[in-house]
Amino acid sequence: MYYTALKMLTGDRSKYIGIVMGLTFASFIMTQQPAIFVGIMARTFSFITDLSQPDIWVMDPKVQFIDDTKPIQDTELYRVRGVEGVEWAVPLYKGLLKARLENGNFQTCNVIGLDDATLIGGPAVMIAGKLEDLRRSDSVIVDLDGAASKLAKRLPGGKVIPLKVGDTLELNDKRATVVGIARTSRTFQSQPVIYTTYSRATSFAPRERKLLSFILVKAKEGADRQELTKRITKITGLTAYTSDEFKSVTIGYYLKYTGIPINFGMSVLLGFIIGAATAGQTFYNFTLDNLRQFGVLKAMGTTNGQLLKMILLQALMVGSVGYGLGVGAASLFGYLLRDSVLAFKFPWQLLVLSGTGVTVICIFSALISIRKVMKLEPAIVFKG
Amino acid sequence: MSNQTEPAVNVGNAATNAAELAVKCSGVAKGYGVDDSKIMALRGVDLEVNKGELFMLVGPSGCGKTTLISVIAGILDQDAGSCRVYEHDLLHMAGHEKVRYRARNIGFVFQAYNLLPALTAAENAAMPLIINGVKRKEAVKRASEILAEVGIGDRTNALPAQLSGGQQQRVAIARALVHNPRLIVCDEPTSALDHETGARVMELLKRVALDHQRTLVIVTHDARIFSFADRIARMDDGRIEQVVNSPAQLEH
Ligand SMILES: Nc1ncnc2c1ncn2[C@@H]1O[C@H](COP(=O)(O)OP(=O)(O)OP(=O)(O)O)[C@@H](O)[C@H]1O
Ligand SMILES: [Mg+2]
């Protein structure tokens, strides 16, 4: 009977392809859109991910996410260093500064100031130059994407010459020399990233009473990080998060205060509805077209239970083929665009999500068809 | 042989011994629709068909022939009256019992062939065995043997669309036979075929399908095949008007 069911299904090529395409589309949308969403969400905290050395981030209690810097006083660093269980603590400056390019244009940049002594928090991958070159005067390291686009030189002919080692920029009227190019993970902010030392960054920045953005802390071996964050908060009155906590706080902010989840949620829902509608409709049409065949099987003594299993199998078949193609297409999409600006992350949970979606669509399609076939009068077989 | 002079509706030589009967219907009534719009398709049909007989049902369009064989084949429930087919009492049969009854006992031949277009001739003919739980491979093997018997042993792997009407009807006959049912019902088996092909199909049915264990009830309009019948019942307006032994005795 199962063989017959599959033969019936694939026997009508064009209809079979139609149903499978509907389900492929639905699976694709339900996988690809969330993958982009997850990719974008991961970008919101990629700066924290890149900074793998510290265990704990200390900051002003009003900070809501990684790019929301609220400076604290430099002296807080020493208080944190004094907390029991702290192996080391270093300052980190993170702020938006205007860079003046050679052609006179201004470009806002995300300036990161690293601890002068240790350079902790520097980029992991250097394309040109060395991180230690930051110890030279006026030196900065620029990220690859920024160097190639927003900070690049544009000649009158439209030709773009990337910023390279040895070039200079002005940050708040102060001269900066590029000593290295680094690869960084894309962040949610599209500005170029400029690395320099903490003291130089604060000299670039406008004079203010407070300039310290974050204190990066390494816990002593064996020290409980949760306990340590609590202790730091208790002693300093500042907020302290473990890296993972800070990531969730950041993602939580974006989920709560931006339209991003809703927009993606809508596309996923739309993909699901369109997929359900087209697949359901085509599958139901397929059943209607084959109603006479089901009637013949019924007249010849096929039980309703057997017919039900046949239809479920047919739905399962189109569902799994459509799902495979859809997920495959989504993976291919992500793979082909892996080097582009597109955010795309494909954790296994997404397979479960789209798989569940397709299963629901198939069960729904099968149910309306099953209802029709169950109620079918076998006596129709004698009608011309 | 003939007792056509008798005034009773049920003439012809129906066996008097109930054990010799394949079908026995009394007062079978069946209507379609409800209340005012109800159409009475059968208005009290009394019918006896002997075992091993080729029995034809004839009559004008709309007189209830298809409805009657649908009741006998167990794909339609009568409203009133009793109907026995061999030892099966259709009146007191539950829905699932009727499904089983059809699977085991009935072979179907339709005017429109009704083969599954995606299956080969052998797979189509094997269907009743598969429905009865025989393994596919074994079922197809047996179906191929029957296809050879009905004269299309060389087309077992052809799809219905690749066969002529006469060949398709042979596949349908093989399908009606393959599970060795005791009653085969045919609704207009020859009307879609030209005369010569129709006559060959009837010869085939009579030669291969009929034996003393198996009974054929054939509904037809086609006067040219009347001569194949052992007995003919003429229906009109939901009743059996006349049962005769030869076409010459029919009143219309
Ligand atoms: N499903 C149905 N719903 C309503 N009326 C029906 C239905 N099937 C048959 N009828 C009516 O019942 C009567 C008998 O129909 P049936 O199909 O048994 O006739 P028939 O003798 O087989 O006719 P034909 O020679 O045209 O096939 C007709 O009046 C027909 O219109
Ligand atoms: Mg009819």
Image (cartoon, coloured by chain):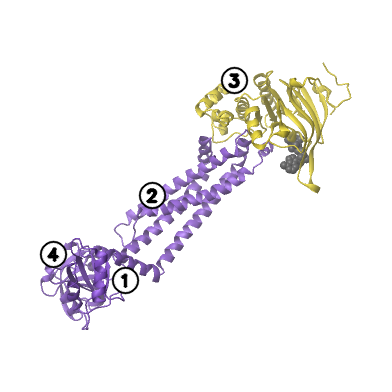
* Residue in the picture at 53% in, 54% down: A277
The location of residue A213, given as percent across then percent down, is 24, 75
Q: Chain of mark 1?
A: A
| Residue contact between numbered discs 1 and 3, judged by CB atoms under 8 Å | no
Callout in the foreground (3, 4): 4
Of the residues under marks 1 and 2, which one precedes in the sequence? 1
Q: CA distance from mark 2 to mark 3?
A: 50 Å
Q: Are marks 2 and 3 on the same chain?
A: no
Q: Is residue A139 visible?
A: yes
Q: CA distance from mark 2 to mark 4?
A: 41 Å
Q: Are marks 2 and 4 on the same chain?
A: yes
For disc 1, the neighbor class at 10 Å (few under 14, some 14 to 19, many from 20) is: some
**Residue farthest toward the top in the current orientation of the protein:** B1
Q: Are marks 1 and 4 on the same chain?
A: yes
CB of mark 4 near ligand 1 (< 8 Å) = no
Of the residues under marks 2 and 4, which one precedes in the sequence? 4
For disc 2, the neighbor class at 10 Å (few under 14, some 14 to 19, many from 20) is: some
Q: CA distance from mark 3 to mark 4?
A: 89 Å
Q: Who is closer to the viewer here, B85 or B129?
A: B85
Colour chain A appears in: purple
**At numbered mark 2, what does the secondary structure look like: helix, strand or loop?**
helix
The location of residue A92, given as percent across then percent down, is 20, 72
Q: Which residue is mark 1?
A: A65
Mark number, residue A328? 2
Q: On the rendered structure, is A148 left or right of B103?
A: left
Q: Chain of mark 2?
A: A
Q: Which residue is mark 3?
A: B149
Callout in the foreground (1, 4): 1
Say which amino acid is labelled 1.
Phe
**At numbered mark 1, what does the secondary structure look like: helix, strand or loop?**
loop
